[in-house]
Each structure stands twice: as C-alpha cells, then as structure tokens.
Amino acid sequence: MKRVMAKSGRKHFNLPGRGHDLPFSDGVLAGDTLYLSGRIGLDPRTGRAAENVEEEARLMLEGFREVLGKVGMTMDDIVYVTVYCTDLSLFERFNAVYRTFFRKDYPARAFLGASDLVLGARFEIQGMAMKRTSAAKAAFE
C-alpha cells in the first residue's frame, strides 16, 4: 500500500495492484477520520463489474473493508456511506449482502439512483469512518 504524508497532516492511501494511475486516493486519513473514495465491485478476472448482483455488492464491500483495514479500522468504524445504484429495484438484494458486513449498528446511509456508473457497475459506495476513542466507545456502550 502506498502511503503519502502531506504537509497538511493528511495520509493518502492507495491499495496495491489497483492497475490504474487514476487521479484519486483510495482513502485519505485526516486526524481520526478516514474519507473513502468511491468503490465498485470489479471481477478480478475481467476488470468489469461482476455479473452476479450479490457478488458485485460483496466485492465492492470487501474492497471498502480492505481500505479500512490498512489504517486499523473495521466496517464498524464507518459513520456514513452513500451508495449509488443504477437499478433501484436491487435495493433489497443489495441490503441482504450489506447486512453481512456489520456486527451491530449500521452507519448512516443514503441509497441513490444513478443512470450510469463506471465499468458497467450497478453499485458504487463512498463513505467516512472515524476511529473511536475509549471515551466515545464508553458513551455508546
């Protein structure tokens, strides 16, 4: 994983093997907050969106989890996500997969319709995560 520490105190993260020189970072850590770029569920064999809806959602969320793991966070550290979807009739099928990635409470979320997404994706997710301090954890437990 490539890490760049900017003068601003922000750390920029890119997962290895991304295969593209795209003009964005997979994540930016600013203080205790991680900003996660949009992710789609690409089939590693084809480089396109997975053909199966549930597989595409799973691959997308696994990629999100991988970025979180690079800074010592988990899916439970996510506070907000936006999900873009090209077919809103897939809402329940997406939710069935999404639920399996969280242990307890879900982050705040928006689920929005989009006419098209890159590489033929049906879903794209972006979000923010925050490392919990001991005091903050105690307040919620």
Image (tube, rainbow, N blue to C red):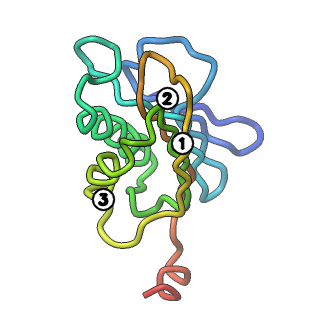
Q: Is residue 81 left or right of residue 91?
A: right
Outermost residue, front direction?
89
Q: Is residue 76 left or right of residue 21?
A: left
Number of other residues with Cα within 10 Å of mark 1, as a class: few under 14, some 14 to 19, many 20 or more:
some
Label 3 sits on residue: 99
> In this orientation, which residue lies closer to the viewer: 130 or 49?
49
Q: Measuring from the top left, give residue 13's x and y in whole percent.
A: 53, 34
Outermost residue, right direction?
8
Q: What residue is at 33 percent from the left and 72 percent from the top?
A: 104
Q: Measuring from the top left, give residue 28's x and y in whole percent.
A: 60, 41
Distance from Cα at disc 2 to Cα at disc 3: 26 Å
User: Which badge, 2 or 3, comes first in the chain's sequence?
Assistant: 2
Number of other residues with Cα within 10 Å of mark 3, as a class: few under 14, some 14 to 19, many 20 or more:
few
Label 2 sits on residue: 14
The quadrant in which residue 4 appears is: top right
Label 1 sits on residue: 126
Q: For marks 1 and 3, give the one nearer the viewer.
A: 3
The quadrant in which residue 9 appears is: top right
Q: Which amino acid does the dot numbered 1 rest on?
A: Gln
Q: In which quadrant is the C terminus drawn? A: bottom left
Q: In which quadrant is the N terminus drawn? A: top left
SS at mark 2 in the image:
strand
Q: What residue is at 56 percent from the left and 44 percent from the top?
A: 112
Q: Which amino acid does the dot numbered 3 rest on?
A: Arg
Q: For marks 2 and 3, give the one nearer the viewer.
A: 3
Are the residues at dot 1 and dot 2 in contact (C-beta closer than 8 Å)? no
Q: Which amino acid does the dot numbered 2 rest on?
A: Asn
Distance from Cα at disc 1 to Cα at disc 3: 16 Å
Q: Measuring from the top left, give residue 12's x and y in whole percent.
A: 59, 35
Number of other residues with Cα within 10 Å of mark 2, as a class: few under 14, some 14 to 19, many 20 or more:
some
SS at mark 1 in the image:
strand
